[in-house]
Image (cartoon, grey):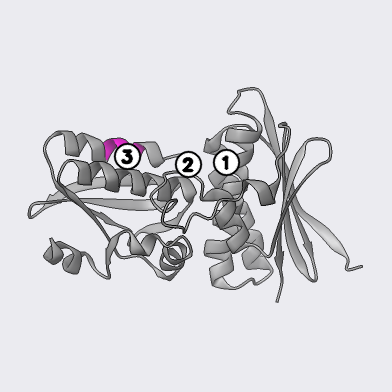
């Protein structure tokens, strides 16, 4: 499991490879907060290479969304597979996040 | 009563770093008994991760030196996971929070038990040489 960060257009894009769970959620949180502190405002998390997400991982996404919004920024999500869509629907987090089918669509939406 | 067999019986140190390995083993067993792809890739991994992290962080209070035992039992009708920690136990019904209400939707925590109950057919907690959380998934 790992996270890679790159800048695409004006957006910080984070790829989550493997699981986003209790054991690694802090790493993701810190990486995004570091970029936020540098003044970045637009964030996209891409889940095309993600296996599953647990409640801690979902909690980190909620927390990051709040912190980014407080700084006048935006967090969007892309490429959730069917299982991850189900997870977001079960928890109604699909109503809280702007979710795009592809990275391109998400980038265009900013 | 349906015949059952123990698919694995492990004792792991009380550390979240061990969760992924146990979950991968559980997924292998799920594939072997031909559970649906969604059960193998979503229901079991997420529910078992929740039970293990609850055991490590709450039951064992994230204290080093403690252990968590996890067993998988397969019968013709059910797949059962039992996660045992050294804590005092809890009431599943009482502790479950509906994380989908407007006031809870933006909370960072409180989705673990809710997800376990959504993804498994039955979730129970009881005392038996430690606090046991039993997750049951009916086989098709």
Which is more toward the observer, A37 or B40? A37
Distance in Å between CA atoms under marks 2 and 1: 7 Å
Q: Are marks 2 and 1 on the same chain?
A: no
**Residue A82 versus residue B61 in the image, above or below:** below
Tell me if residue A30 is in the magenta stretch. Answer: yes
- Specify whether disc 2 shares its chain with disc 3: yes
Labels 3 and 1 in the same subunit? no
Judging by the rendered image, the residue that carries numbered circle 3 is: A29
Q: Residue B66: image x %, image y %?
A: 67, 26
Q: Quadrant of the C terminus of chain A?
A: bottom left
Q: Secondary structure at mark 2?
A: loop
Cα distance in 3D space between marks 3 and 1: 18 Å
Q: Which residue is mark 2?
A: A22
User: Tag 1: Cα neighbours inside 10 Å, few (<14), some, or many (≥20)?
Assistant: many
Chain for numbered disc 1 = B
**Chain containing the residue with disc 3:** A
Q: Is residue A16 above or below residue A82?
A: above
- The residue that mark 1 highlights is B53
Using residue B100 as the reference point, say whether residue B71 is left or right of it: right
Residue B43 location (% of width, % of height): 57, 62
> In this picture, which residue range is highlighted in magenta?
A27-31
Q: Secondary structure at mark 1?
A: helix
Near-viewer residue (A7 or B57): B57
């Amino acid at each position: 499991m790992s996270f890679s960060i790159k800048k695409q257009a004006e957006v910080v894009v984070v790829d989550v490879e493997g699981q986003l769970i209790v054991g690694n959620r802090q790493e993701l949180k810190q990486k995004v907060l570091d970029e936020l502190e540098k003044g970045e405002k637009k964030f996209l998390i891409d889940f095309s290479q993600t296996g599953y997400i647990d409640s801690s991982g979902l909690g980190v996404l909620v927390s990051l969304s709040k912190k980014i919004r407080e700084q006048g920024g935006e967090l969007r999500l892309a490429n959730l597979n069917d299982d991850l869509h189900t997870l977001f629907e079960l928890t109604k987090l699909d109503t809280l996040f702007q979710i795009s089918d592809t990275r391109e669509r998400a980038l265009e939406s900013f | 009563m349906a015949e059952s067999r123990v698919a694995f019986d492990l004792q792991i140190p009380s550390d979240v770093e061990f969760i992924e390995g146990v979950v991968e083993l559980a997924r292998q067993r799920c594939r072997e008994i031909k559970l649906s792809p969604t059960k193998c890739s979503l229901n079991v991994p997420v529910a078992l991760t929740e039970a293990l992290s609850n055991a490590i962080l709450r039951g064992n209070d994230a204290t080093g030196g403690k252990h968590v035992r996890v067993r998988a039992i397969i019968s013709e009708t059910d797949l059962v996971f039992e996660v045992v920690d050294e804590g005092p136990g809890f009431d599943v019904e009482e502790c479950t929070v509906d994380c989908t209400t407007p006031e809870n939707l933006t909370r960072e925590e409180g989705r673990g038990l809710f997800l376990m109950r959504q993804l498994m057919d039955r979730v129970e907690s009881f005392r038996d040489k430690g606090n046991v959380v039993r997750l049951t998934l009916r086989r098709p």
